[in-house]
Image (cartoon, rainbow, N blue to C red):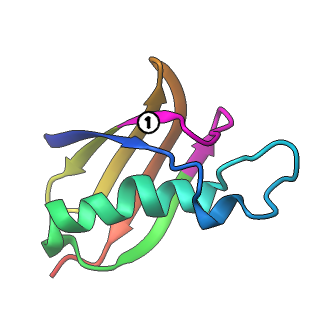
Amino acid sequence: MEGAKWRVTVMPDSKYFAGHFPGLAVFPGVAVLQDAVLRPLARLRPELGRLRAVKRAKFRRVIVPGQQLDVEVTFLAGSGEVDVRILSQSQLCVVARLCFDER
C-alpha cells in the first residue's frame, strides 16, 4: 500500500476559532479534515477527485491553536479510499477513512 506523510500547523488566526469556543479555542473536526487532510491531499493526488463520504472518523484528542499535526495517509489500491491518521506529539488525535470519486 502506498502512503504519504506531512506536517500541518493549526494557525491561531484560523476563521474556525471564531466563537468555537470562547475561552477554550478548539479546532472543529470538519476543519481538521478540510485543512489538515483534504487540501494537502488534493495537491498531492488530484486524481482522487471529490470527497464522496467519510466512512468513519474518530476524534480522540482536542486540537487547539498552534498545535502541530503529523498527517499520515494510506491509499487503499483501486478503491478510492484513503485511511488517515493524525498525530500530535506522537499522540493519536484522529483516525478516519475517506472515500473519493476517483477520476
- Front position in the image: 70 or 98: 70
Residue 8 in view here:
yes
Where the N terminus falls, by quadrant? top left
Horizontal side of 94 relative to 19 (left or right) equals left
User: Looking at the image, which residue is at 26% across and 60% down?
Assistant: 41
Asked if the magenta segment contains residue 81, the reply would be no
Where the C terminus falls, by quadrant? bottom left
User: Looking at the image, which residue is at 62% across and 39% down?
Assistant: 63
User: Looking at the image, which residue is at 79% across and 58% down?
Assistant: 20
Quadrant housing residue 60: top right
* Residue matched to label 1: 69
Query: Dot 1: within a 10 Å radius of its alpha carbon, few (fewer than 14), some, or many (20 or more) residues?
Result: many
Q: Horizontal and vertical percent for residue 81?
A: 30, 59
Residue reaching furthest to the right = 23
Q: Which residues are magenta?
A: 57-70
Residue reaching furthest to the front = 13
Q: Horizontal and vertical percent for residue 29?
A: 62, 55
Asked if the magenta segment contains residue 65, the reply would be yes
- Front position in the image: 22 or 63: 22
Mark 1 residue type: Leu
Q: Horizontal and vertical percent for residue 34?
A: 46, 64
